[in-house]
Amino acid sequence: MEMERQNDLNLKATELRLGLPGSDEQPEKRNNKRASSDMDNSSDGEKGDRECAPPTKTQVVGWPPIRSYRKNVIQAKKTEVDAAGMYVKVSMDGAPYLRKVDLKVHKSYPELLKALQNMFKCTIGVYSEREGYDGSEFAPTYEDKDGDWMLVGDVPWEMFSTSCKRLRIMKGSEAKGLGCL
Amino acid sequence: MSHDPAEMSEDDERPPPADRGRAEYADQVLENVLENVLVFLTCRRDRNSVSLVCKSWCRAEALTRSELFIGNCYAVSPARATERFERVRSVALKGKPRFADFSLLPPDWGAHFAPWASAMAGAYPGLEKVYLKRMSVTDEDLAVLARSFPRFKELALVCCEGFGTSGLAVVANHCRQLRVLDLIESEVTDDEVDWISFFPDGGTSLESLIFDCVECPINFDALERLVARSSSLKKLRLNRYISIGQLYRLMIRAPQLTHLGTGSFSPSEIVQQGDQEPDYASAFAACRSLVCLSGFREIIPDYLPAIYPVCANLTSLNFSYANINAAQLRSVISRCHKLQILWVLDSICDEGLQAVAATCKDLRELRVFPIDAMENNEGPVSDVGFLAIAEGCRKLQSILYFCQQMTNAAVVAMSNNCPDLMVFRLCIIPRYRADRITGEPMDEGFGAIVKNCKKLTRLAVSGLLTDRAFSYFGQYGKLVQTLSVAFNGDSDMGLKYVLEGCSSLQKLEIRDSPFGDSALLSGLHHYYNMRFLWMSSCRVTRRGCREIARQMPGLVVEVFSWNNNAQDRGEENDIVETLYMYRSLARRVDAPKYVEIL
């Protein structure tokens, strides 16, 4: 999961990030290697000129060492789900009819919220872990796999997109209850 | 020079005419005696030793060797091999270097079976068995096999590509004595040929039919009839296009099976409640000899209880395509007291591994594959499950373990608890990751493995490793034959330690590690003892590689990159993208344009 520095959700200002639960700072000693493309001919053994860790989370060819055959099989299982798209119904309080949005198309919360705001011509406002969408006219909520209504933004995007069954854009006053859990 | 018939002479000189008859007669007797004795010698290493005694022993050994094993198809030319060994009935050939599996070898690199097929067609009319691994095999090659060898009995294609169902049809149809047709992790093109229908009518001698890697639908009716008329069939591994209902029908026709690959292990249509389904458990119960179970390619866990009846006898279980959780695994594994080999996905979590450790006291081989291959902070399995295995499965000989986090302590524990370890392959997925708890490099853990596991022959490392780890490998890894390194080490010293210390090293594959020319040149004393050296994205230059080629004419030194072509060779001081070098008695004549042979 990447640390998303997103303007829209203003997460950095609140020093909150969308990451896996429990994934705090790691005492990682990534102090010795640069990505192979950056290799120069500096002499060996000099820890001084070593760069920071190579880019994380990027796909490196052939790593981890899993046979293409096995990778394809597991990938194929994932793609079957992917190809179908992930359309969920979106309702907005006060709107006469529902819409549908494909969660697969949007890769992050800011994108999704932007799309919803465009679709319904509303302002959803800024997310904070403490206050939810406090202060804005509307708040996005969703029904998860267990049938509970949750506030959009609390969990990492991947977790949200796989558990979201439908969306509902609630009036701010009603959503206050959700923000206080 | 006179030729003394009482000696075993290496001399090729002809004796004076007067003595020639006696000398030749004595030689002939000796060779006949030798041949009759050597026929019983099957071990490859012993045969190689025998052939070094003297010329006449070499000849006798060559005449009696019936199983030919060639670990690198480019180490010798087909002509030379077939000239030396005249009476071969079984051939095993290995082609591409292992890193080809991970897309590190550009396509069309080589390892073509064709020249071998045609050489053998002429030389070995009695050929019965062919085993190919990582070779490029075409339909035409398969046709040559089928046409040229009337006694052909066994074909195994492991990690091969280049052929399709039309090639399989020719083999099925022409090889009337076929006992074994094993397609394992190979890429098979769907030519839309119904190859199963090409087996001849009437009883077959089939003992093993493995096609779980074939990614195209099968004519089920033809398969069912084939199984029904193959009374010797012991091993059957189905592909994922076979539903559980179809599996049932096959199992009741073949209760004598010892090895079964279950196919999809799910129904072909949505099963409604109240639908009548066959009694799958009884079909399994009827297979009293079943010891090896695999498949489960699209498993619906509800059907797992069907396999309970065979669990007590299972020695090998492959769940590595089955996305099951800890509880589901436990329901099966708690019954598998005799299990020796287990392959699983990490969906079973540390908890699942604890269940394995609790029951499978006889476990020899464990492989844990990741569902999610991305680098993460956490994963479903970690040092916790690893430690449980170390404490519970003391007879472990071989482990392959993918995880996101590991500790030195857990690895040290395994080194102390599992003295029989021969193969240790630990893949910490995030590159350069340190000990989860201490933040230190993983040097001490891997070091303990080479130090304490006195039988260790194969090692694959990962995580944050400094040159110190490599010093341990060189110091203690005296039996290590195969070593895989990726994103490890600090400097040339790392590789030097290994090349100077690991006296049994045969196969060394390294990627993305800071080893350069100085390290490369420190292995000159050893490269003729090795099968190959692979170094990609390291720091060796063209100049360094050329120096090796100059000093060691018995090596083929290949240098290549994905974007290379003949016009664009690069400077001497340029770092080469990939170096692949191997001992060889032949020159490559079929290298693609992007391969430069120095």
Image (spheres, coloured by chain):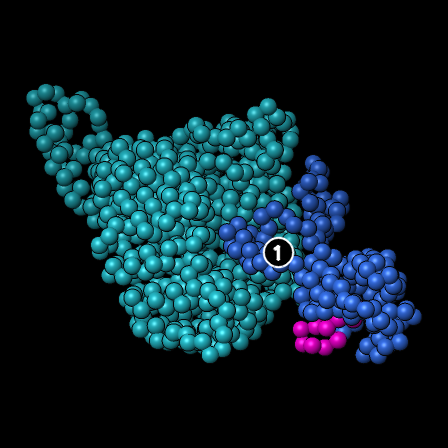
Instruction: Assess whether residue B237 is covered by the magenta stretch.
Output: no
Range of the magenta residues? A139-149
* Residue nearest the observer in this picture, B241 or B27: B241
Q: Residue at x 12, y 29 (%)?
A: B24
Residue B64 position within the rendered picture, expressed as x and y whole percent measured from the top left? 22, 41
Asked whether, in this view, residue B454 is left or right of residue A141, the answer is: left
Residue B234 position within the rendered picture, expressed as x and y whole percent measured from the top left? 30, 61
Asked whether, in this view, residue A177 is left or right of residue B128, the answer is: right
Q: Which chain is drawn using blue? A: A
* Residue nearest the observer in this picture, A46 or B145: B145
Residue B16 position within the rendered picture, expressed as x and y whole percent measured from the top left? 12, 20
Furthest residue to the top? B17
Q: Residue at x 60, y 67 (%)?
A: B380
Chain to which the residue tagged by mark 1 belongs: A
Q: Is residue A132 visible?
A: no
Residue type at tag 1: Ala
Q: Colour of chain B?
A: cyan
Furthest residue to the right? A135
Above-or-below relation of B122 to B331: above
